[in-house]
Amino acid sequence: MNTTTVFADGAVTLSRAKPGHWRRALAVVAVLALAVPLAACGSALGAGTAVGPVPTPELHRFYAQKLDWSRCGKFDCGYLEVPLDYGQPGGKTARLALLRRKATQPSQRIGSLVVNPGGPGASGTGLAAGLADRVGNSALGERFDLVGFDPRGVGSSEPAIKCHTNRERDDDRLYRAEDHPPANEVERRAVDAKWEQYAKDEVAKCAERSGVDLLANVGTRDVARDMDVLRSALGDRKLSYLGFSYGTRIGYTYAEAFPDNVRALVLDGALDPNANPADELVAQEAGFQQAFDAFAAWCAKQAQCPLGTDPLAATAAYRRLVLPLLNKPLPLPDGRKLAFGDAVIGTDSSLYGPQNWEGLRRGLEEFAAGRGQILMAIADDYYGRNSNGDYTGADDARMAINCVDEKPNTDQAAELELSRRVLAAAPFEDPGYGPSSARSACAFWPAAPTSVAHQPHAVGLPQVMVISTTGDPATPYQAGVDLATALNARLLTAHGTKHTAAMDGDRCVDDIVTRYFTDLALPAQGASCTLAPPA
């Protein structure tokens, strides 16, 4: 679901984003150095961070603003002004990039449908552009203005989070800690210390290039506030919202803060707001192993499978294929080198849905023949790197947002235990270096968290809808079940192996979602859809 449009100062390739979990991405880039990922998953508004449905007088000018739309290809583009710090509404402001596709039947228009693809760090304007053709001839396209926004610090919003130059990003992806596993405890501690220094350096770059005031105010708490300002500026009395993956965190945070302002929410690929971040990461890693096993079973039935014909031996076969990259990255025609981290990220990225499996099979087949262009191209897409070598900045934004959305782990012993659990949960990713006690960048973040995991409490919220897929590798099925219970929402179960299901071509799911948004008709209790297997 890719499309290209023009926004602000240039052409941007826009696509429906994967939910990329920045610490998993860092892990496989830095897994060579034993930097173990933590969950880039959900937390909601915590004690002392509550926001109310009635704007204060100081916020009136933001709620009452009139959006200045301009033509942007076949869409309308604009900016929404919001306070950078809601505690100081008279201070600095931010501008959020907006993209709108107007309803095709204005006489039947219900209002705006706001969408967000996840990440965090992914472009909501990109999602709106990507969804426009898919929903254009449906009742959703006829009766809703489709509106995407780039959250604060993200994409074309201003100011944007900036931590790395393009060259630094390329170098980080190739960077290796040691050419061999640590031989003893002394060596392991030395490697862990190296990667903690690496994390500190990353934080210093972010603080210097983005500013601590921006880094302190990019969390979901503030995105939810922004979305209510957007609702008002769009002229909608109540919000209709479709959120995928991390976008579900935005949705349930909004629901808790502004329950009376909700018309309809669909939260697809849910993050469990009450989950322990460590347990959530382990569950996610197990989900990717499950998806890898499903890919291996499919691959074994194809005419050419580089992992062999025995799915039970696929993990070992995959590791034999990619582990040599730890010591000797593969040179590519463009002068770059495919490292172990990029090979694993290219694989992980392809496991988000069966529609990607043939591409992964071809990439592994090509790699087995000594070429790595396909796997590198998939990894580039994940990291947001275009053919000119420019990065979108989504990785920087993911890190910054997650670091203020959850309580950081500063305990090295707990980090070591988590590392053991992660390696056990996803053995196909294991580089063989053993567990690590190195703490992530969030342990050294210059701003305090603005959210904490807890059970959402949304008094007055109308019954909304959660979609959860049984074989979702990134957001496990049970997380959706738990979120639906917490919000008293109606759960739609999608049977399949992919991440998120709505508006992606499955008629069963799309019809249910469309009826809910247009008529507020919830699916029956226990409703389910079976997603089509890969062709």
Image (spheres, helix red, strand yellow):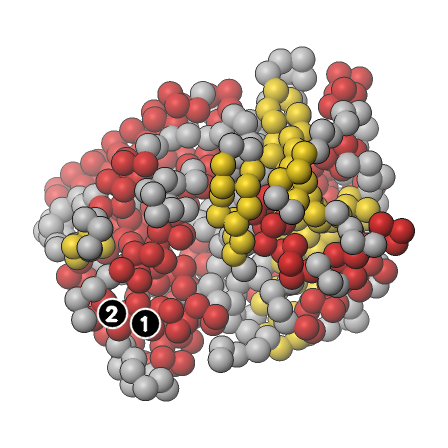
Which quarter of the figure is the N terminus placed in? bottom right
Q: Secondary structure at mark 1?
A: helix
List x then y, in percent, for residue 12.
49, 43
* Left or right side of 389 for 58: right
Residue 239 visible (yes or no): yes
Q: Secondary structure at mark 2?
A: helix
**Which residue appears at 60% of the width and 34% of the height?**
97
Amino acid beneath label 2: Glu
The residue tagged 2 is 366
Q: Is residue 64 above or below residue 462?
A: above
Residue 219 visible (yes or no): no
**Which residue appears at 79% of the width and 71% of the height?**
524
List x then y, in percent, for residue 494.
62, 71
Residue 232: image quadrant is top right
Residue 329: image quadrant is bottom left
**Which residue appears at 68% of the width and 69% of the height?**
509
Binning the other alpha carbons within 10 Å of mark 1 as few (below 14), some (14 to 19) or many (20 upward) gives some
Q: How many numbered marks appear?
A: 2
The residue tagged 1 is 362
Q: Are marks 2 and 1 in contact (CB under 8 Å)?
A: yes
Q: Which of the two residues, 351 or 290, is positioned nearer the viewer here?
A: 351
Q: Is residue 139 above or below residue 213?
A: below
Residue 453: image quadrant is top right
Q: Which of the two residues, 505 or 270, is positioned nearer the viewer here?
A: 505
List x then y, in percent, for residue 204.
34, 25
* Left or right side of 430 for 324: left
Amino acid beneath label 1: Arg
Binning the other alpha carbons within 10 Å of mark 2 as few (below 14), some (14 to 19) or many (20 upward) gives some
Extreme residue toward the right, this view: 107
Q: Is residue 331 above or below residue 414?
A: below
